[in-house]
Image (cartoon, grey):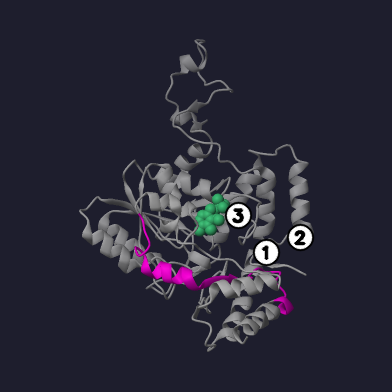
């Protein structure tokens, strides 16, 4: 039986050639492919700076470090996301506070966030991490206004949403990750994402200071910028008198990590980026076909639907007998997936005090949600087979 996954990468001959070229070049890592990918990605998103990193989780970790999350400080995020969106706060010793989702959009509900902020003394919360879940853009204009009111920063988790956008109150189209409203945005290049590097990630920002901090944190906290050196010239020269710092010299000034992307991964990302818009076009066509097929069906309790600017990393439907449908689809070779088990109910977060009933909308969503196959190479025939299989299950 042919297996139809919920998501998969698309690798072309051109991609293979790009990786081969990188493998045959002088640099496997720390070479020119990194900067080329960063510049191309920044241009694609419409942002000033982009920092390539090892994966989306590293991007989140460096972002919370750059924004100086300290032990005990509180940061708000959604429970319907991959655990990394919350875990990055814990890496810095911060406290994760979940706020419920809007059941209509499946995104962090700004009303719930406001309620939390208004109930606490000023300064209790440091930041907000909204997630463009499934590829649907969060309205960050509204979140920015709220964040400014309470003096908070914003990290946009745009892992699902390169190429997605929303329209602001001025009628402008705002791309996810463009940094117009968020301080930092992060992306992942895992194989099921829009752009695949195997593993990979990116941080985008318009803030030069944060950008420079991220570059250093990505590579052990080391700088080679003469203007920033803290040790004196005589020491750097091993005691010999000279007007210049010697060629070998560098300084580790803060505690950083090795979160670098390799050049052959960057070459793959760069090649994939060329097809990013075509991929979204295909994803939108698949979403439109699902929406049309399920519209008005009594067994469909909710669905992603057709939303302007949606990048459709996932297509979610809600059904009452989710377990039954999941198992039936599996028996038909269709590997649907669940996004997500609410983060606050993971044993790790339960140990920190979270419990069932804390996030009623997220928990209700989790009981019913199932992500259907969604990727650019899904054929019309395969999609019709998915739709027919769901119909077959519902009419048993
Ligand atoms: C919303 C979200 N945030 C963060 C991540 C972490 O990205 P990565 O798997 O590249 O570390 C993912 C990817 O799985 C994700 O879906």
Determine crowd level at label 1: few under 14, some 14-19, many 20+ residues with C-alpha closer than 10 A. Answer: few
Task: Read off the residue under disc 2.
Answer: 12
Say whether residue 300 is visible.
yes
Q: Earlier in the sequence, mark 1 or mark 3?
A: 3
Residue nearest the observer in this picture, 138 or 320: 320
Contact? badges 2 and 3 (CB < 8 Å): no
User: Which residue is rendered at x = 52% and y = 79% of the image?
Assistant: 305
Dot 3 beta carbon under 8 Å from ligand 1: yes
Determine crowd level at label 2: few under 14, some 14-19, many 20+ residues with C-alpha closer than 10 A. Answer: few
For residue 111, above or below residue 272 = below
- Magenta residue span: 354-382
**Residue 64 magenta:** no
Mark number, residue 189: 3
Residue nearest the observer in this picture, 298 or 131: 298
- From the viewer's perspective, tell me whether residue 262 is left or right of residue 168: right
Residue 13 position in % (x across, y down): 79, 58
Residue 92 position in % (x across, y down): 40, 42
For numbered disc 2, what is the local secondary structure?
loop
Disc 2 versus disc 1: distance between alpha carbons? 10 Å
């Amino acid at each position: 039986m042919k297996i139809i996954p919920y998501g998969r990468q698309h690798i072309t001959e051109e991609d293979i050639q790009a990786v081969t070229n990188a493998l045959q070049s002088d640099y496997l890592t720390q070479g020119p492919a990194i900067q080329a990918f960063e510049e191309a990605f920044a241009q694609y998103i419409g942002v000033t700076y982009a920092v390539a990193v090892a994966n989306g989780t590293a991007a989140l970790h460096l972002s919370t470090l750059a924004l100086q999350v300290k032990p005990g400080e509180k940061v708000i995020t959604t429970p319907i996301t991959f655990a990394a969106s919350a875990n990055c706060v814990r890496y810095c010793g911060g406290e994760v506070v979940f706020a419920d989702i809007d059941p209509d959009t499946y995104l962090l509900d700004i009303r719930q966030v406001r309620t939390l902020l208004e109930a606490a003394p000023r300064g209790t919360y440091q930041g907000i991490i909204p997630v463009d879940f499934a590829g649907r853009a969060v309205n960050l204009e509204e979140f920015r206004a709220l964040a400014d009111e309470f003096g908070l920063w914003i990290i946009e988790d745009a892992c699902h949403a390169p190429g997605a956008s929303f329209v602001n109150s001025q009628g402008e189209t705002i791309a996810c990750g463009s940094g117009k409203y968020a301080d930092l945005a992060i992306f992942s290049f895992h194989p099921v994402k829009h752009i695949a590097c195997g593993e990979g990630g990116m941080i985008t920002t318009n803030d030069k200071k944060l950008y420079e901090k991220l570059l250093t944190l990505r590579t052990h906290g080391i700088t080679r910028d003469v203007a920033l050196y803290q040790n004196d010239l005589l020491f750097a020269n091993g005691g010999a008198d000279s007007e210049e710092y010697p060629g070998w010299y560098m300084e580790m000034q803060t505690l950083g990590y090795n979160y670098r992307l390799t050049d052959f991964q960057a070459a793959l990302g760069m090649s994939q980026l060329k097809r990013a818009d075509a991929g979204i076009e295909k994803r939108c066509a698949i979403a439109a076909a699902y929406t049309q097929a399920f519209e008005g069906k009594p067994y469909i309790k909710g669905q992603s639907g057709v939303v302007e600017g949606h990048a459709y990393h996932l297509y979610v439907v809600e059904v009452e007998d989710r377990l039954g449908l999941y198992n039936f689809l599996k028996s038909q070779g269709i590997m649907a997936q669940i996004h997500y088990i609410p983060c606050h109910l993971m044993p790790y977060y339960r140990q920190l005090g979270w419990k069932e009933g804390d996030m009623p909308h997220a928990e209700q969503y989790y009981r019913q949600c199932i992500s259907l196959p969604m990727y650019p190479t899904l054929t019309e025939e395969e999609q019709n087979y998915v739709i027919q299989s769901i119909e077959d299950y519902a009419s048993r």
